[in-house]
Amino acid sequence: METQIIALLIFLGLATGVAAVGMFARDVALSVAAGVVGPRPIRLRRMPRPDTNDAPQGFAGRFDGWFAQLVQETGWGWTPMTGALLVGLSALLAGGAAFIWTDHPVAASAAGVIAAGLTIVVLTVRRVRHIGLLQKQFPPALEFIARSVRAGHSLDEAIAMAGQEGPKPLAAEFAFCARQIEMGLGVPAAVRSLAERVRLVDVRIFAALLGIHREAGGNVAGVLEQLALSIRDRMSYRRQLRAITSAGRLSAFFVAALAPIIFVYMYFFHSEYAHTLIESSMGQMFLAAAVVLQIIGLTWTARLMKPMY
């Protein structure tokens, strides 16, 4: 029976690995082709309204939507299926390796869950960095659009120039808006689609400003310059806040890492205590409670150190 389980795990791992590597190679080939041959052709599609009745229902539907958005916002150009296969591959490989090493299904399941969680953490960190890069590039893009308008270009032309001459990855988003405008979509609607793709408060404010300007008119260049100045001031405030709370965040990191380090030390150097903790029902209950309390404490600390705006 154990040989059959090991063979099944190896088969599933190999099958998932081949599929993940194939889809990853496809994405890399498309990226290389876009960099060598020219810009990737932009496919226009109708963006669904957030208030439609087709919104995912239930925990599984909400999790699928969250994971698809997570993979999309990493900036790697992966599909949600590629991200799901990567998570499954890491879980199968870690779980299979732990099962072969310890011959214990609980340890294999825990290793698989930890590996999948670490993969999702890597994707989340990548998304945070990608969104941070977009946030950093947004004020210069607004100033570029304002200067272009002051130089005599229309707002449509200014957005198109920002997509052609601006830094990536934000330039690709403006290029998509410019292509939508060329196909007949209005500027406010194109910028609203940008706000749906790039989930930033500043982009939503930018879309609202352009909508008001299209309805009532006014000095759009001056408004965009004031918005860029406000964004820079808020980014400066956040940097100061991170500098002030650096000691607290470092203390939270050491407190969070202390328990796993002690558990790993006890598992390898005092295995009798670790096995007693894992195998007994009371030890498993205490271990699960410790993990839950650790997650609650880290979440609470992160919320306390996060700025409201």
Image: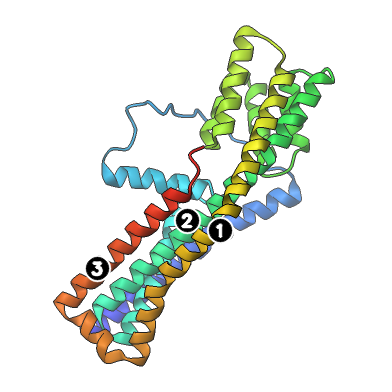
| Precedes in sequence: disc 3 or disc 2 | 2
Q: Which residue is mark 3?
A: 288
Q: Is residue 289 above or below residue 1?
A: above
Amino acid type assigned to the residue bearing label 3 in the image: Ala
Give the residue drawn at x 48%, y 47%: 306
Q: Are marks 2 and 1 in contact (CB under 8 Å)?
A: no
As rendered, which of 55 and 180 lies closer to the eye?
55
Name the front one of labels 3 and 2: 3
* Residue 82: numbered disc: 2
Q: Is residue 52 visible?
A: yes
Amino acid type assigned to the residue bearing label 2 in the image: Thr
Q: CA distance from mark 1 to mark 3?
A: 30 Å
* Circle 3 crowding by C-alpha within 10 Å: few under 14, some 14–19, many from 20: few
Horizontal side, residue 43 vs residue 37: left or right? left
Q: Quadrant of residue 119?
A: bottom left
SS state under label 1: helix
**Quadrant position of the N terminus in the picture:** bottom left
* Circle 1 crowding by C-alpha within 10 Å: few under 14, some 14–19, many from 20: few
What is the x, y in percent for residue 46? Answer: 50, 28
Q: CA distance from mark 2 to mark 1?
A: 35 Å
Which residue in the rendered view is the most extreme toward the right? 151
Q: Is residue 29 above or below residue 96?
A: above
Q: Is residue 161 above or below residue 22?
A: above
Give the residue drawn at x 41%, y 74%: 258
Name the front one of labels 1 and 3: 1
As rendered, which of 21 and 158 lies closer to the eye?
158
Q: Which residue is mark 1?
A: 246
SS state under label 2: helix
Q: Is residue 76 visible?
A: no
| Precedes in sequence: disc 2 or disc 1 | 2
Horizontal side, residue 24 vs residue 32: left or right? left
